[in-house]
Image: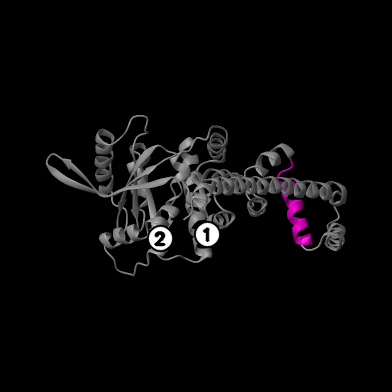
Amino acid sequence: MSQTQNTLNPIALDIKQMIDTSRENVAIAVNSEITLLYWKIGKRINEEILGNERAEYGKRIVISLSKQLTEDYGKGWGKTHLNYCIQFAEIFPDEQIVHALRGQLSWTHLRTIITVDNPLKREFYIEMCKLERWSSRQLQERIQSMLFERTAISKKPDELIEKELRELREENKVTPDLVFRSPLFLDFLGLKDKYSEKNLEDAVLSELEYFILELGQGFSFIERQKSMVIDGEDFKLDLLFYHRKLRRLVAVELKLGKFKAAYKGQMELYLRWLEKYDMQENEEMPIGLILCAEGNREQIELLQLDKSGIKIAEYLTALPSQELLQQKLHKAVEVARSKMENEVR
């Protein structure tokens, strides 16, 4: 390689970085301006045309307008797109909120979010999308997999959900109930009908990247079969992770079959050992996650595991139908909310 090429390499790298950064900034600016434009179009149609409140009249106007805009500006201005603009302005009537959102999420993100029918669920997906930096495809997958219904926060009363989401938005405060989810979808492990705990652990480690994606962003793998010598006896924790946002060690135990009450004592022992020997300064208390094929709801309730810093999550090695999943999760949310309301009374 010539002297001139050696000299130019650092310069070329610097210039490439400048070009890439500039392109990213332009893309962000363009998205921001387009998002605001779509909101203003939706607002104008809502106020000036659809305020007539005659549904059929409004539909005809939107169709006519889309034809005119398509003639003037080409593809992309069909009635479906205009309806997205209208819905966007209806759901987010405050321009200040739109200004905040357009700098953090793309139009594709927002177009997906406005299809979510529940305001609290929309807020959850907005804040989690910002926190975990989901792509628009990841956002669609999270909504389709009913992530909100799989997190513990969905089982709380609305006012508590609003409080946690507000703290996340304003203080960047992340709670375990926003992070941990159940069930976990582990269909990517390729496990057959019969397998052992070691088979399960081996499969998780061989597909660790996918396992962490299913757990959620922020998890970092530390160790497998973490050794703990207590009273001369050697104990082994299946998996040890660290969660950056929670600033906690996360002890994970993999179990076959239903949850058993004995698992609590085992996990408590591991957590207290980690607290004593592995926890670093400025970290929060370690938290435990026990993965079971099936939960035992009453045992879990009676053991009050949250007070011990222990979470239980079911896992599925084969995905159910969307209909069955919806029924299962909606029922779980209803039962948990009813229980919390009765406790308040």
| Residue position marked by numbered label 1 in the rendering | 326
Checking the image for residue 167, the label placed there is none
Residue for point 57% across, 47% down:
17
Residue 100 found in image quarter: top right
Q: Main secondary structure of the magenta part?
A: helix
Which residue is identified by label 2? 186
**Residue 37, position in %: x, y?**
77, 47
Q: Secondary structure at mark 2?
A: loop
Q: Is residue 73 above or below residue 167?
A: below
Specify whether 270 is left or right of 81. left
User: What whole-number distance in Å separates the C-alpha atoms at marks 1 and 2?
Assistant: 18 Å
Earlier in the chain: of badge 1 and badge 2, it is: 2
Instruction: Report the amino acid beneath label 1.
Output: Gln
Q: Residue at x 32, y 53 (%)?
A: 259
Q: Is residue 40 left or right of residue 323?
A: right
Magenta residues?
A: 76-94
x and y percent of residue 295 in the render? 36, 54
User: Is 203 included in the stretch rendered in magenta?
Assistant: no
Quadrant in the picture for residue 279: top left
